[in-house]
Image (tube, helix red, strand yellow):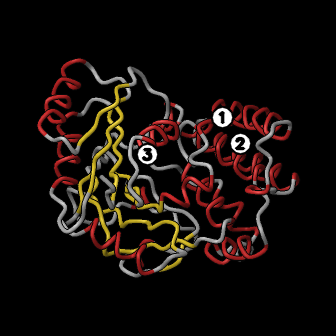
Amino acid sequence: MNRDVDVIILSWNRADDTIAAVESALAQDGVSKAVQIVDQGSTPDNLARIRELVARHPEVSLKELGGNVGVARGRNIATRMGTARIIVTLDNDAIFEDSGTLARSVKRFENDPSLGAVAFRIINYYTRLDDEMCWDYPRVPSSQANREFLVSRFIGAGNAIRREAFIAAGEYDETLFFGGEERDLSYRMLNLGYHMKYVPDLAVLHRVDPEARVHWNEGRYYYLVRNGLYTDYKFGMPKWRLARAAAASVVRGAYNGLLTQALRAVADATMMSFRFSRSHQRTSIYRLRKDARDYIDTCEHRGEESVWNRVRRQFVKLPGSV
């Protein structure tokens, strides 16, 4: 069956949340859909509950990996499980805000052939306020979350992607493992001539635990720095700017008690960039066209921040850090 939407969900324990996410997808009206679940090593009791859910719904599929292969690879696997023209990503700790979200998403793509992806609004399930930890639109304050605007990236917790654009851009870069895979894919899609929008009337409710959300001490800062530098290298950032970004990341890491992570991230990003430069991956998809670069610069307001503000940002405590 040729469906409109594949909803992809990565699961790892938290069976209650995963089941709620799947049921939220199944409750969507006015659209043909399938749900693709990739489990990355849930315990037997959690996995048994997900299997039971899948057995009751023929439109839900489950692939068990037995271990964590990373967000990027997991989402690639889940996407390949389906064939729908629109791919909707939903975190397993999120649900759709209303039953018409998927239908309105499909309509967006039907009305705009050059739309490559839609960034959903991410709302805290408990407070019903915008989830500021899921706000990744440079220089656009989260206070403007109720308006629509062009973006250069989307958030993994909730988004919709045109499958045709996803495949043409080469899927997620699986070497990133965790963090930043959305920006990397977005830039490649923009380089193919697509554009993206943040659309606030397409929203998900995210079950955020404010006390345990950010685990900087468990490697999150490492991936943030490593993947950011590596992605910037792939898209041609000048070496002097990369060096400046690396130095700023080390300073910020030291200020937040994460110096070891920062140094390891810079070293690993350097090695990944060296291997990339020697590989077949260095294709035209990573050489940003002028229109794509101008689009990114406009969305991210590049060049507008003063040197003083750049320096000051390195001495701001990361949320939840020690």
Earlier residue among tags 3 and 1: 3
Residue density around tag 3, few if under 14, some if 14–19, many if 20 or more, within 10 Å: many
User: Mark 1 near mark 2, Cβ–Cβ under 8 Å?
Assistant: yes
- Rendered position, 307 above or below 248: below
Q: Which x, y percent locates residue 227? A: 64, 43
Residue 66 percent across, percent down from the top left: 38, 20
* Residue at numbered disc 2: 250
Q: Which residue is mark 3?
A: 79
In the rendered image, which residue does mark 1 sit on?
Answer: 259
Q: What amino acid type is highlighted by mark number 1?
A: Leu
Q: Are marks 2 and 3 in contact (CB under 8 Å)?
A: no
Vertical relation: 55 (above or below) 242: above
- Of 65 and 68, which appears nearest the observer? 65
The amino acid pointed to by label 2 is Val
State which quadrant residue 59 falls in: top left
Q: Residue at x 63, y 35 (%)?
A: 175
User: Which residue occupies the extreme front position in the image?
Assistant: 1
Number of marks in picture: 3
Label at residue 224: none
